[in-house]
Image: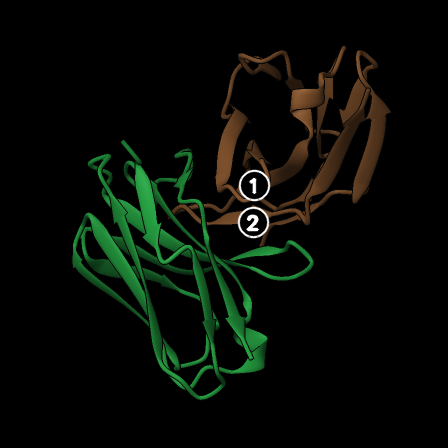
Amino acid sequence: AQSVTQLDSQVPVFEEAPVELRCNYSSSVSVYLFWYVQYPNQGLQLLLKYLSGSTLVESINGFEAEFNKSQTSFHLRKPSVHISDTAEYFCAVSGRGFNKFYFGSGTKLNVKP
Amino acid sequence: DTAVSQTPKYLVTQMGNDKSIKCEQNLGHDTMYWYKQDSKKFLKIMFSYNNKELIINETVPNRFSPKSPDKAHLNLHINSLELGDSAVYFCASSPTGTEDDSYTFGSGTRLTVV
């Protein structure tokens, strides 16, 4: 079975500062990894995903995540955050075979002016 | 146009009641899901349907029964509601249901059982 650990429940950061949201996973098989973002009172939206190929994946709004197989990690980073990035971020791993996601407990990113 | 829509958005009801949550997707996806997000924000899959066929049925009380009249709809019926059922329920869909698919989520139904 797969599992996901997000070590930080909350990350406060000032606007324009860099940020890293940590995600570690556990799996006995190859995995696909995802980051989703949830804005207040909304559903989750896909931010980026790693399926294969380059271990560094990027989103359209400046986030990036790097798949590190040896450390079983998929940390999310942004070099300079904006107020509008304030949201909850969920890391997820998909199970083998039929699509079933295992989500982490989420990290609340709070960007302060 | 809302891709995955759930109704109602909020639902407050008494213990023991029976309630339904509806979900519809207009993306042409083959697979639909129900997830439960508890008060600590943990998201856990409950059910998954592929072309109206039940594929995933996690350890969920029998009081929860999904129904998929067609591949664009997946409704969730809950009998004899309990306090512990209070949560946000998310419907989602994905194109094929394979392991590399990404989901499109609805905006959630906040269920409060009093």
Q: Distance between the Cα atoms at labels 2 and 1?
A: 5 Å
Report crowding for label 2: few under 14, some 14 to 19, many 20 or more residues within 10 A (C-alpha).
Answer: many
The answer to whether the residues at label 2 and label 1 have Cβ atoms under 8 Å apart is yes
Mark 1, secondary structure of its residue:
strand
Residue at 28%, 39% (x, y): give it: B96
Residue at image position (65%, 16%) is: A64
Side of A30 relative to A3 (left or right): left
Colour chain A is painted in: brown
Do badges 2 and 1 share one subunit?
A: yes
Decide if residue A67 is in sight here: no
Identify the colour scheme used.
by chain
Q: Amino acid at mark 2?
A: Tyr
Tag of residue A93: 1
Q: Chain of mark 1?
A: A
- The x, y position of residue A61, in whole percent, is 58, 13
Indicate the position of residue B16 as horizontal and vertical percent values. 44, 88
Q: Could you tell me which secondary element the residue under label 2 belongs to?
A: strand
- Res. A102 mark: 2
Amino acid on which the number 1 mark rests in the picture: Val
Residue A25, position as x, y percentages in the image: 68, 42
Say if B80 sits above or below A96 in the image: below
In the rendered structure, the answer to whether residue A38 lies left or right of residue B111 reads right
Q: Residues within 10 Å of mark 1 (few under 14, many from 20)?
A: many
Q: Colour of chain B?
A: green
